[in-house]
Amino acid sequence: MKSFERCHPVTNFVYYICAVIFGMIFLHPVFLCISFFSAFFYSLKLYGGKVFKSFFCFLLPVMTASAVINGLTAHYGVTPLFFMPNGNSVCLEPVIYGFVSGASASCVILIFFCYNKTVNSDKLYYVLSKSLPKTALLLTMSLRFAPMYSKKIREISEAQKGLGKGTDSGGLSERIKNGLRILSVLTSWALENSVETADSMKSRGYGLKNRSHYSDYRFSRTDAVMLSVMTVCCIVVIIGAAKGETYVLYNPFFEISKITPFSVFVMFNYVVFFVTPLISDLFGEYRVKNPKKGAIPAQRA
Amino acid sequence: MENITIKNLSFKYPESGKKALDDISLEISQGEYIVLAGKSGCGKSTLLRHLKPSLTPNGEREGGIFIGEKEIGLLSEREQAEKIGFVMQDPDNQIVTDKVWHELAFGLENLGLDSDTIRLRVSETAEYFGISEWFTSDTASLSGGQKQLLNLASVTAMRPDILILDEPVSQLDPSSAGNFLGILSKLNKETGITVIITEHRLEEIFNSADKIAVMDNGKIISFASPSETGELLPSVDIIKYLLPAPMRIYAETGDFSLPCPVSVRDGVKWLSETVKSPVFTSVEADTNVNAEISLKLKEVYFKYEKKGKEIIKYLNASFKKGVITAVLGASGAGKSTLLKLIAGIYKPLSGKVSAGGKLKTAYMPQQTRNVFTEKTVLADLEIIDKNKENIGKTVEVTGIRDILNSNPFDISGGEAQRAALAKLLLTSPDVLLLDEPTKGMDGEFKEKFALILRNLADGGKTVIIVSHDVEFCASYTDECMFLFDGAIASHKDTRSFFCANAFYTTAASRMSRPIFENAVTAREVIYLCGKNLKIQAKNQPKE
C-alpha cells in the first residue's frame, strides 16, 4: 500500500471529483458530517495543526456568517426565533440552512486543500493530456510563463529605476506613465520571445502527426484496489440517493428521510469512500515504520 | 555515415541588395567538430539556419545542401526534426514546458514515441548530462547554465546525427560555458555526433575542434584545422578579433618556423623555443593615475531576504574619478548586487555608499534591452531629454546615428549596448555603472565600446563595469577589483592585478608568464616578442 499522493492520477482525480460533487449536493446532516469531518481529518493528516487555525479563523466564521446572513435575509420558516424591529420574523430553518450550506462550502474548500497537497501540475497535465492534449500543452507552457514574467518585470523595473524612470519617481501621473512603459516593454519582449520559442518547438518536431504523451505513472495494485473500493461505494451511494436515503428539506420546514437498515448501509459506504485516502496514507506509514519480517536485512556486524 | 555537402550556396534576404551568403562550398564528414568563426553579421547564423530546414529564412537561394545523397529540402519533417538538432543562443526562450523531465520528453513526444521508450531515453540522457539531481525541478528555477545544458540535453535525447549550435554559451558565465563546452566535446568524441558551432569566445572551442571555417562578408575565407588556420591567415585583418591569444600571438609575431600553438600549454612551449634569450622582459608600467576618489563604500552589508543568504558582507571599496574600474568575480559572488547598491536600486542594510558631493549614477543592466521602452531608439532618447543639441552630442559620442530610427528589438547586441549607453548618458551622470557590457559582443564591437568608455572617463566620469570578460578588462580598464564571498579580495591597477593572479588572468599572461614579467595582453606579448626577435636576428647573423 502506498500513500494517496503517490497514487496514479486517475485514482486521485476519481476521488476528488466525486468528493467535491458529493460534498456539494448531499446536505443531509449525517452525510454532510461524514464528508466534512473526513475532509477535515485528511487535511489534518496532510498539513498538521495549521488546519485548526484555518478552521477557526476562516471556515467557522464563514459558516456562522452564512447562518446569520441567511437567517436575517430569508423570510421562510415555521419556527420563529424573534421579530426584527421592522416586523419581519427570523426563523430557525433559514439559519440552519445557512449554516449547512456554509459547512458544505467549507467541506469543498477542505477537499481542495487536500487536492493541492496530493496532486501536482504533472498529474493534472497527465489527466488533461489524455482528454484535451492541446489544453494540456498550453497549461504546461503557461505555468512556465508566470515566474518568467514576474522575473522580467522586476528586471525591467530595476533598469528603469536606474535611469530615474522607475515607478517610485516623480508625481502620480509620471509614475503611472512609467509603470505603463514597463508593461509595454514586457509585451514586446514576450512577443519577441514567443517567436523563438515557436522556432524551438518547430525544430524539435512539434506539429508532426501522432504526437504521444509521456508519463511516468504506473497503475499499481494499490490503485486497482482503491479504485474498485471507491467505485463500489460510489455506486451504492448513488443508488441510495436515487432511493431517497439522502433526502432532506430545509425550506420552508425541516424534513428528513427515516433511518433504515438500508440508509445505514449507504452511510457506511459513504464513510468508506471518503476515508479511503486517509486509510491508505496511514497504512502506508505503518508499513514503512513496521516493515514485514525479513524486509530489512539484519545489520552486518 | 551521413556527410554534409554544401555546394555553391548563395542567399539573399528579401529586399536586400547584398548577398548574406556568397557562393559557399563546404564538405563536412560525419563526426567532425566544426567551428564557424567570423565577425558579427558575417552570415554565420544565416548559414547555420540553412542547415535546419524548419528554421531556414525566406529569400533568394541558389546552390544546394546535401545530407548524404539527399538534398536537405527533401528531408521529411520527421527526419529533419529527429536528425538535425539545433540549439540557440538564449537559454530561456528555447524552453517550452514547466518541468525539466517534461522538457526532455517534449521532442520525443512530438516524434510519437511510446512511454517506455521515452522513459529510457529521458533517464539515460539525464544521467549523461548530469541533470538527474534537478530532474523533477521547475525549469524556471534553473540557472542560465543549467537551462542551456537542458536545451542541449533535450535536443540530444532525440538522437540526432548533426548538432547545430548558434552561439550557445555567449549568455553564460565562463565556468558554465566551460562546463557546457566540455560536455559538448565529450558528446562529440563518445558518440560521433557531428557538431557545427559558432561562438565569439573561441579559446576553449579551438582545442576540441577538428576544423575552423572562417567567414567574412558571407564568404568562407578559410577551412582548415585550428593550427593550420593560424598559419594560413596571418595577413587577414579580422584575425586578431577571432583567434585565441596563443594563435594570435603566433600569427602576428610573424615567425612561422615552428607549428602554430593552439592551447596555452603549447603557447608556453612555443614562446620559450622562439624567444630563446629574452632581453626585453617587461613593458613600461603605465603612469599611475592619482585621481581623486569620487565614490566610497563603507562597511556595506546586504542580503535579499531576512533569513536569506548574505550577499555583500561589510564591503569596503573606493572608486576614482576619470578611471575605468572593473569588478571581477565568479557568478553569484554579488557583483551585480554591488552595482545595484551603488545605483541606489537597493539600499544597504547597514553601511554607507557615499559620494563626494552629490554624484548622479546611471545603471546599465545585464539585459541591455530592458533599458528601452519605446518603438525607436530616438524616441527612447527623447524620453530622457528633449533637447536636440544634447541628443545630437550623445549620438555622436556613442556612434549610433545609423540606428536612431530602428526598433531597439531589431538592432544587434553591440548596437543595443551603445544605444543604451546613449540613453544613460542623457541623464548626465557622473558615475556610469555597467553590468556585463561585453556579453555576447565580438572583438570589434568590444574595441569600439571600450573607446567610447575611455573618452567618457577622460571627460571626468567614473566608470565602473562588472564583468567576467578577463581579456576585455585586461585590455581596457585602469583598475580591477576581485569580489569574492561578498567582499573585495583584491584591488590593484589592472597590470599588477593580472600579474598577481595565476588562474584568473588572461591567456596571454598565462602563456608569457615564464618569460616576460608583466605582459598582460596579446598585443604586449607580440610587442615584446617582436623586440626580442629583432635583437636575436642581429646577434645571430644569417649563416
Image (spheres, coloured by chain):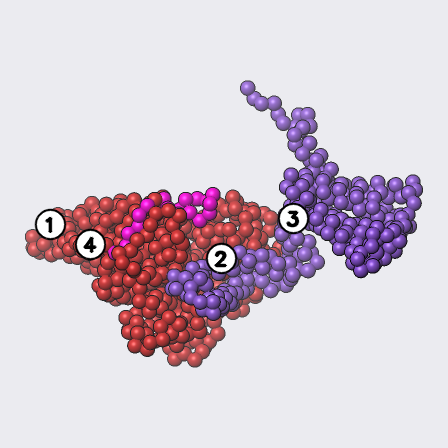
Chain colours: A purple, B red
Residue B212 in the image: state x and y as whole percent. Answer: 35, 60
**Label 3: which residue?**
A116
Q: Secondary structure at mark 4?
A: helix
Mark identifier at residue A120: none
**Label 4: which residue?**
B525
Give the quarter of the figure containing the C terminus of chain A. Answer: top right
| Amino acid carrying mark 1 in the image | Val
**Label 1: which residue?**
B279
Secondary structure mostly seen in the magenta stretch: strand
Extreme-top residue of the structure:
A301
Task: Indicate the chain on which mark 2 is placed.
Answer: A
Report the residue at 78% width, 56% height from top. A72
Residue B342 in the image: state x and y as whole percent. Answer: 34, 55
**Label 2: which residue?**
A151
In this view, B52 is above or below B500: below
Q: Earlier in the sequence, mark 1 or mark 4?
A: 1
What is the C-alpha distance between the residues marked 2 and 1?
56 Å
- Of the two numbered discs 2 and 4 in the rendering, the one whose residue sits closer to the viewer: 2
What is the C-alpha distance between the residues marked 1 and 4?
13 Å
Q: Nearer the viewer, residue B315 or B114?
A: B315
| Amino acid carrying mark 4 in the image | Val
What is the C-alpha distance between the residues marked 3 and 2?
24 Å
Residue B445 in the image: state x and y as whole percent. Answer: 31, 65
Whether residue A14 is visible: no
> Within 10 angstroms of label 1, few (less than 14), some, or many (20 or more) residues?
some
> Magenta segment range?
B294-313
Give the quarter of the figure containing the N terminus of chain A. Answer: top right
Task: Indicate the chain on which mark 4 is placed.
Answer: B
**Is residue B149 left or right of B509 when viewed as pictured?**
right
Q: Secondary structure at mark 1?
A: loop
Instruction: Respond whether the residues carrying marks 1 and 4 are from the same subunit.
Output: yes
In this view, B413 is above or below B182: below
